[in-house]
Image (spheres, rainbow, N blue to C red):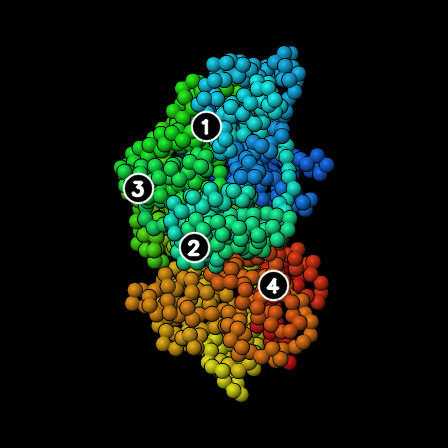
Amino acid sequence: MIPDFDLLKSQLEGDLFTDNVQRVLYSTDASQYKEMPLAVTRPKNKEDVKKIINFARENGTSIIPRGAGTSLAGQVVGPGIVVDVSKYMNRILEFNEKENYVLIEPGVVLAELNQFLATYGMQFGPETSTANRCVVGGMLGNNSCGLHSLVYGSVREHILEVDAVLSDGSETVFKPLTKEEFKAKLNGNPNQLEKAIYENINELLTDKANQKEIRGQFPDPKLTRRNMGYAIDVLLDSEIYTDGGPTFNFSKLLAGSEGTLAFSTKLKLNVIPLPPKYKGLVCAHFETLEESLHGNLVALKYKPTAIELMDDPVMQAAKQNREQNKNRWFVKGDPGAMLMIEFSFETEEELTSTAARLEKELSKAKLGYHYPLITGEDKIKRVWSLRTAGLGLLANIPGDRKGVPGIEDTAVHPEYLPDYIADLKKVLKKLGLESIYYAHIATGEIHFRPLINFKDPKDVELFNTLMNEVAKLVKKYRGSMSGEHGDGRVRGKFIPFMLGEKNDELIRSVKKAWDPDNIFNPGKIVETPEITESLRVIPGKAIPDYITNFDFSENRGYFRSIEKCNGSGDCRKSDKIGGTMCPTFMATGDEDKTTRGRANILREFLYNNEKEQAFDHKEIYDILDLCISCKACKSECPSNVDMAKLKAEFLQHYYDIHGIPMRSKLIAYLPRLNKLAMVFRPFSNLVMNLSFTKSLIGFSTQRNVPELSNITLNKWTGNGIPKPETSKGTVYLFNDEFTNYNESDIGIKAILLLTKLGYEVKIPFSKESGRTFLSKGLVRTAQKIASENVSLLKDIVSEASPLIGIEPSAILAFRDEYPDLVADNLQEAANKLAKNALLFEEFMAAEIDKGNIDQSLFTNEEKQILLHGHCQQKAVASTDPSKKVLSFPKNYSIQEIPSGCCGMAGSFGYEKEHYELSMKIGAMVLFPAVKNANAETIIAAPGTSCRHQIKDGTGKKALHPVEVLYDALV
């Protein structure tokens, strides 16, 4: 019988969904598992949580607590009611500077918490690689550690108190208890379930035979990363059962319990001072992985704050990621492995001398060949970004075999690592497998990622064999199968083997005492299903293949391009974290507005399609509707998922079935319609900005539609283009459809500026860029335009005579989309053209670097400039050239607004149903920055849509860099 979710929905202040799309979105995490939940809820408060728990108990179902869904072991995958705390239960409630604690709700994102604490010179110690999106409640569930666990330990060492709702709906607070307080919990406790919980643990841990079994079978206590089962070994060490031990605190048991015992609604965390001022990374390069293992033991003697490992495949994968390739600047050659050894000291001298001594000892032992010391906050941040992108980067390895979670969380004491790795390599060789090696080598945990293809039934069986073989190895070294990622579905079944049958019985009795009705996250830690059940893919089932307009062959087809999303959730960053991806999530906090969410819906409905037409899915159409095609995922997602490209391809196929909506057709063909509208220009401008016209088209009446210019750029140049007095060379200016019809004044200024600087400007004959067609999914028309433009321009554009573009979205089509659109016979020409198609600022910056532009041609007047970069510029090119040219006049100073997408995104912000979200995106960072700028500050924005959004959102006029530099001429 299906529970009455309408009744529950009426009782909640938060949200409840039972539709298929939302259930699909929450059916996976960052693991290989998938299971459809009954419903998805997003509680607003503790009372909502209690109602959901009571409803689950009364209806014989379960709940699955969830935060960002970055779990690697399938912890938040299950058949019950998903309870997502990230949307609403994310407040920082109190910070006590005197007593060094912070009170938070479980949905607070770690990086945002640390941003808040940093203003007081404090931090929460455990720092995961997913810090910019993971929530602290999830960290408690996994007992997360992170980069600096060598000095800061895990969440277990920093959790002080937990306000929790128990499985019967009652509330309690778990905190440190004196012996007297502990006895009071056993005697006269009015909360019967809480009393039973304390009675259970006391009965288990007072038994001498149990004590011996726990101390003899649990992982080596010297190993800091040990997280199998429930932490009854930690409670055994408390003063209740061990003389001289710390106070008893059930919060320590909840750390690592994966939401299987209680539901946390408020957390009290210990906070610590920020690290010393002088930090540095010794990035030791090694010829082999084995060398690095011994290098790690040398480095540990110097008391570093962290040591992280990266092997060659991870560093090679970084070359394929535009964002991370820039972060390889310090890598010399192709090392087989690298250790990133971090030190923090109070003085610079301590830092440099320690680094020098370490280098000397490593060199003397013939361990490594290059030991650069990286200092400076920005550079260190970039190095760590390269390391923490490891998981996502692995999705770029071509083929169906991917580095999968399973043995990635094993940990042994660091002194055993060389022998353990040698044994592991033998196992891998015997099974015909290869693995990637990276992560927390200092504390004995290396993330192994053997390449497995779950689509192949033989590989599924191979995975099962591998897990069993590795479990034997880990036990040999008295290590832990779960170091920080938890047991979940993938390692829970090994608890009886790793800890012994008796300890497994003790763990089961704990679960039974806390959760007699098995409401909380069943199938994790206790009674775990087989590790090869409920996989995302069905072994042996062929994946769909399609004839596409874009070339997806680099990823072996359209579907595999979707599969590059591994669920790591990098697209769940908030506007507080920065970056561009994903603007719609930043504005809403909704999973269905993430790149991951869109990829999951595409994957699910195409993989399990039963329709005659594979792309005939309104569910996909609807979820892609709010993808604004900003392209940020192409660069910021470590897996390089290009959702804009996937969306455009889908829309073309969907329109083949259902026809093209009239508004989409009007927007796509706008450049051609503008040619006709120019004949009636004053009247056209008047009519297009009438509320009636905007409503008829489907535009928001609150928008100002861009007006046509007095004269097209084509017409202006028809009378001849001025020649420079002395020519430094020829440049071809791409007369894009936006500049030609709507902003010809910018085009004219660009010509006059370039001429004044000594360049002969020519306007080549070409078609429009095709951007409007691409944005609305008319890919075949864009394909024809791309082919025509490549054919027209291939013989004239070169490195010596580049093609320069004013509007980023137009010129970058040559670089981004054209090579994937044209036929094979034009491929080479398209790639050559792409290399020589430059943003105006890129050309100018290169000429400045060559010394070809004289600064004396520009004013010495002081000016302050605020720059908002175009999102496609950030994704495919860079804002660095814009900053360089805008600061070229002697006394011009430039500051880039840390905004992501402006929210307009071409036509998106004009469309009536998208207007509110568009303005919400702009209001996150961009609008406040512009509004707070003084009247004399110049606002610069290369993108035409961005300039219109700034005008509509702030009332201020933004200028193209062309205009800024033209006005600066003397």
Circle 2/circle 4 CB separation < 8 Å? no
Q: Residue drawn at (47%, 81%), measured in percent from left and top?
A: 729
Q: Which label's residue is closer to the chain start, 2 or 4? A: 2
Secondary structure at numbered mark 4: strand
Q: Where is residue 153 in the image (x, y as percent from the top left)?
A: 55, 36
- Provide the residue designation for mark 3: 433
Front residue (pair 34, 477): 477
Q: Where is residue 242 in the image (x, y as percent from the top left)?
A: 57, 19
From mark 1 to mark 4, how far is it between C-alphas? 54 Å
Secondary structure at numbered mark 2: loop
Circle 3/circle 4 CB separation < 8 Å? no
From mark 3 to mark 4, how far is it between C-alphas? 50 Å
- Provide the residue designation for mark 4: 867
From mark 2 to mark 1, how far is it between C-alphas? 36 Å
User: Looking at numbered disc 3 in the image, what kind of residue is underneath it?
Assistant: Leu
User: Looking at numbered disc 4 in the image, what kind of residue is underneath it?
Assistant: Leu
User: Looking at numbered disc 1 in the image, what kind of residue is underneath it?
Assistant: Pro
- Of marks 2 and 4, the one in the foreground: 2
User: Residue 219 bears which disc, if any?
Assistant: 1
Q: Residue drawn at (55%, 27%), measured in percent from left and top?
A: 254
Q: Which label's residue is closer to the chain start, 1 or 4? A: 1
- Provide the residue designation for mark 2: 369
Which class describes the residues within 10 Å of circle 2: few (<14), some (14-19), or many (20+)?
some
Circle 3/circle 1 CB separation < 8 Å? no
Across the whole image, how many numbered discs are drawn on residues? Answer: 4
In the figure, 412 relative to 806: above or below?
above
